[in-house]
Amino acid sequence: MLAVPGCDDEAASPPPVAEPATLPPVTPSGEPPAPDTPAPEPREADAPAAPEARTFTRSGERPGMQAIVTALEGDLPHASLLGRPSEVGDGRFVTVASTDSESPTLHFVVVSEHEGAQIEAVVRLPIEGIDATYNEAPSVVAREIADHDADGETEVMMVVSWGGPPEPAIGAYGHKHYFIFDLDPTPSIAISVETLLGATFDEIRGHVRLRDTNGDGHPDVTIRFTDCSGPDDCDRREAVFAWDEATDSWPTTP
């Protein structure tokens, strides 16, 4: 402690020796650098906001097929529809569109009418290798609009068929692909599974149906098929895809 004259009888202590001053660093411009800014405290990343579903004004009238093709031009130029659109019941209609090429792609389309056809959603189907040069062009051979998973909402079931290239000793064969589409909050694929592989003896799939196999009150997708190691060595089997509440779908992989 420093001694204060007149308040202490002891001799004042010698003043401390000052340390040599340290000059601040200088930037190339001759100006001292800005003081360091403390880094902000780390925080947890904000969860991404869920996309909001668009709202559409719907007249409830069925849009014409040519009007739908014209409205699709921005997303799918030169597309064609695989049949007349089916009515969902709330002013929406659903169909499948195919691109016009030798290797077409297929798309699930949700459309409504308001001063013309308005496209509400286009979802590409995970089908590859379609060759349009063969006799059987892609077609929708079955469709059903109902609450397929018993969750109180409407889904769309469709089966899409197309021809395949000839195989040695087998000839031409066909493919069938089974889909269920969720419509809300945004259209998406709830299950996608091929149900017919007619060119091999490994799996010849067949009948598809919905039934509750685990007692949770929601139907599961079951496919009965023939598993063969040869033309005279076959076993009947059943594949089960259980409905998953968290994803509102039937996962086909563990």
Image (tube, rainbow, N blue to C red):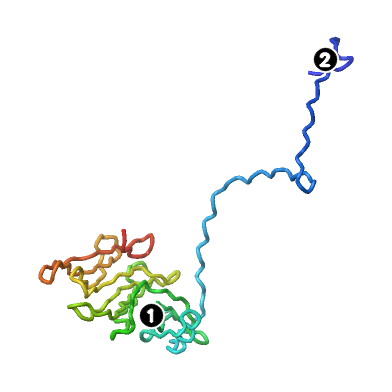
Residue lying farthest top?
Answer: 9
Residue 13 tag number = 2
On the rendered image, what quadrant is the C terminus found in? bottom left
Pinpoint residue 92: horizontal percent, then vertical percent: 43, 80
Q: Which residue is mark 1?
A: 104
Amino acid type at circle 1 is Pro
Badge 1 crowding class, 10 Å Cα cut-off, few under 14, some 14 to 19, many 20 or more, is some
Q: Identify the image quadrant of the N terminus.
A: top right
**Image quarter of residue 128:** bottom left
Marks 1 and 2 sit apart, C-alpha to C-alpha, by 97 Å
Q: Residue 39 location, x and y as percent?
A: 64, 45
Q: Name which residue lies at 38% across and 62% down.
A: 247
- Residue 41 in the image: above or below residue 227: above
Left or right for 33, reference 128:
right
For image coordinates 52% across by 87% down, the residue present is: 115
Question: Observer-nearest residue: 93 or 10?
Answer: 10
Kindly identify the amino acid type of the residue bearing the numbered disc 2.
Answer: Ser
Find residue 78 and name its label.
Answer: none
Which type of secondary structure does the marked residue at label 2 adopt?
loop
Q: Nearer the viewer, residue 212 or 169?
A: 169
Q: Is residue 25 left or right of residue 229?
A: right
On the image, the x and y values in percent for residue 182 come to: 39, 71
Q: Earlier in the sequence, mark 1 or mark 2?
A: 2
Q: Looking at the picture, how far across and down is residue 8, in whole percent?
A: 85, 12
Q: Relative to residue 71, is residue 15 drawn left or right?
A: right
Q: Residue furthest left?
A: 232
